[in-house]
Structures are given as C-alpha cells and as structure tokens.
Amino acid sequence: MALAPCHAFFQFYVADGKLSCQLYQRSCDVFLGLPFNIASYALLVHMMAQQCDLDVGDFVWTGGDTHLYSNHMEQTHLQLSREPRALPKLVIKRKPDSLFDYRFDDFEIEGYDPHPGIKAPVAI
C-alpha cells in the first residue's frame, strides 16, 4: 500500500486586503516534517499574495495525526533547549508574470541566523 498524502487540503481567503491560508494536514512528523511544511506554505502565501496584489495575512496550520517519534526525542529536547533567535525577513526581488515563473534567485532571506542543524532519521 502506498503512503497516503499528508497534506489533505488548504484554503486561501482574503480579509481586509490580506491573503491568508489554512492547511489541514492529515498526518505529520512533528520533528522532521512540520518545520519544512510551515516554511513551504508560508512561502506559498507570500508568492500568492504578491501575484494577487494583496498583503500577506496569516498561515494557519491544523494537524490531524501528529506524532513525535521515539527515535527523535533526543533531537527534540536539543531543539527545545535552544534560545530562539530573531526572525528573518523574506524578500521577493521581482514579480514574475505567473506563480509558475518564480526562480530560486527571486528569493532572499535577510537576517537569517540559524542554530546548527540537527540530524534525525526518517521514521517510516
């Protein structure tokens, strides 16, 4: 049996000139998957807002079967022990003709000061 898609659906909505998005995720690996999912969908909201000439609103994440695997506990404790750093700022350097015309070099992250990476095995 193939693994069912984890991202069940997402919805964009506009309020007060701002584009927001809510994602419902059927299943989620909290340590490895969730940070990537949040960053990916937040980027998508910024791209869609730019294409629609709207300001960026909120990204709301809702998880169904969220799990923290036992072989990720040490890494999770390390992550939680770290002091948060200032949030970086996403800069989109140009507005392409469509959502499908963005290139890697259209994006810049200012003020990104990450902690060292934490490796963990995929648990599936």
Image: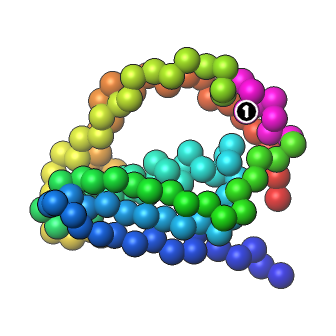
Q: Which residues are magenta?
A: 71-78
Between 109 and 65, the residue placed more toward the observer is 65
Quarter of the figure with residue 54: bottom left
Q: Is residue 96 visible?
A: no
Above or below 36: residue 96: below
With 68 as the anchor, is 100 left or right in this view?
left
Quadrant placement of the N terminus:
bottom right
Q: Position of residue 7 (x, y in %)?
A: 57, 69
> Which residue is painted at 65% across and 69% down in the image?
26
Under circle 1, the secondary element is: helix
Which residue is at the far right? 70
Q: Position of residue 66 (x, y in %)?
A: 70, 56
Q: Position of residue 123 (x, y in %)?
A: 82, 52
30 lies above or below 23:
above
Q: Is residue 28 left or right of residue 72?
A: left
Count of numbered marks: 1
Q: Residue furthest bottom?
A: 1
Tell me which residue sits at (75%, 53%) in the image: 67
Q: Amino acid at mark 1?
A: Thr
* Residue at screen point 82% across, 59% down: 124
Determine if the magenta segment contains residue 77. yes
Q: Is residue 43 visible?
A: yes
Which residue is under mark 1? 76
